[in-house]
Amino acid sequence: MEPAVAFDNSYARLPDRFYAKLKPKPVKEPALIALNDPLAVELGIDPASLNSPESIAALAGNAVLEGSDPLAMAYAGHQFGGWSPQLGDGRALLLGEVIDKNGTRRDIQLKGSGPTPFSRMGDGRAWLGPVLREYIVSEAMAALGVPTTRALAAVATGEQVAREQVLPGAILTRVSTSHLRVGTFQYFAARQDVDGLRQLADYAIDRLYPLIKVGDDPYGTFLERVIQAQAALVSQWMGLGFIHGVMNTDNVSIAGETIDYGPCAFMDGFHPQRVFSSIDEGARYAYSNQPRIAHWNLVQFAQALLPLLDEDGEKAVEKAQTAIDIFPNLFQKNYLRIFNAKLGLSLIEEGDEERIEQLLKMMTKKQADFTQTFRYLANEDHPALASILEEEKIQNWLEELEIRRGRDASTLVEHGALMRNSNPAYIPRNHRIEQAIRAALEGDFAPFERLNEVLSNPYEEQAGAEDLAQPPEPKEIVQATFCGT
Ligand code: AMP
Ligand code: MG
């Protein structure tokens, strides 16, 4: 029989000190919650073969699929600004890699699969809530067009996990273009293991940015690529009102994907200083701080790469500094392009930044719903806009926008399409996610499935899904989100 998954495990061929190899810890009673058929197909896996008792056992960690060579990756990281020299996969195991339909190597990982040598005090498990949450939000991100890790499957374990309460356990199968993080590089740099650092960088370049290998400065270019990828990613988050919540360096992907859906949230009522994470007491990772934090995280990355950038220490620092100094400008360009597209503008000119700022100020004043405001704008529903913002101010602003549009390259039809493809009707709203989790705890997975279905097509209004486009009622507003670890 053909193996269900055609593994080819390049990370497992790196030296021993890059990981700890171990098997997942079996659970009591695996039961499938969700299987992402289109993603399976994209990965070259027959969805039917994943839906067999043997495969479901493997997705719960009760069996190891043929060709899989499970391991927990070692990494370090700055958490809320504080340095942790040893983190690593404490509740995750890389099962192996596959080459997808596009020829891209993808990691397949279990999250919640039991303790590893990196678990510290944790139990290595996850409860149902965060697993469903990550499933919904990461898949929605993909549908919104944002680089992200994906969710291939969710299974219930039939076991209980102890958090503030005792809750049902679950395991997520996560797919990424690579789980390498800034923290993986910091791990080797902090140990002054320059050989390891170089092997890691060569591995990352081969896998993620193969074309730069032929240039005359692969490591310098690698640094630039990672900086560019983060500038692009974080500007996309900003354009959707997304707050990551734990932008620690161990949660910054070298592939430029959104990773680690803990206490993340899409904003409803807009405020630039909005924070959801219950553990982010200093508001370090507030919405409008995200670009600055991304910059800070990239400085840590550049620092870790120093030994590779030049043999001469001073020259290495100079090179790192030059690369890192590009970030603010690069971010701003991406940000303007994204927000201009939200206004139906395809070019950028002087004064655009101010125009965006004016709108955001009006939204802040009324705590207007981020997604709804921009969708009204996309649908040219000016009365609706006037009803949620200050009427006279928004009318003036819209008149100015109309004049500005006259100078833009796009036609009326083009700017309508640009706006509707830049301003989603649906995002995974916090209160809907919580409702789906509450229902699932009662054994009803229909709201979870409905949410996934509607969010798979976020830029088009869908008949019968009007409720999912609405902001929360005052009593439904979610004020805080939790890591769920
Ligand atoms: P995160 O906040 O998810 O980025 O996790 C930070 C670190 O804590 C990572 O090394 C995780 O693997 C580890 N961790 C989080 N939750 C658990 C858990 N329940 N058991 C063991 N390790 C965990
Ligand atoms: Mg993490």
Image (cartoon, helix red, strand yellow):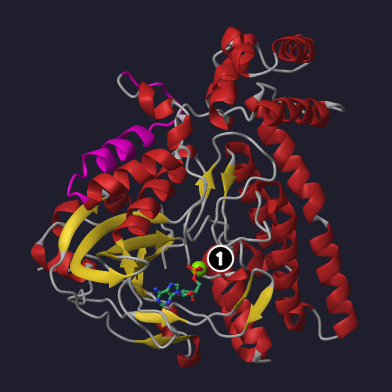
In percent of the image, x 31 and y 78: which residue is there?
114
Q: Is mark 1 within 8 Å of ligand 2?
A: yes
Which segment did they paint magenta?
442-463
Q: Is 438 positioned to the left or the right of 267 in the image?
A: left
Q: Residues within 10 Å of mark 1 (few under 14, many from 20)?
A: many
Residue 304: which quarter of the image? Answer: bottom right
Residue 311 % position (x, y) = 82, 86
Q: Is residue 472 magenta?
A: no
Residue 433 % position (x, y) = 37, 44
> What is the residue that sits farthest to the front in this orientation?
475
Q: Where, quadrant-wise, is the C terminus in this rendering?
A: bottom left
Q: Amino acid at mark 1?
A: Asn
Residue 209: which quarter of the image? Answer: bottom right
Q: Is residue 239 above or below residue 275?
A: above
**Looking at this view, is 431 or 33 the one in front?**
431
Residue bearing the label numbered 1: 251
Q: Is residue 53 above or below residue 219?
A: above
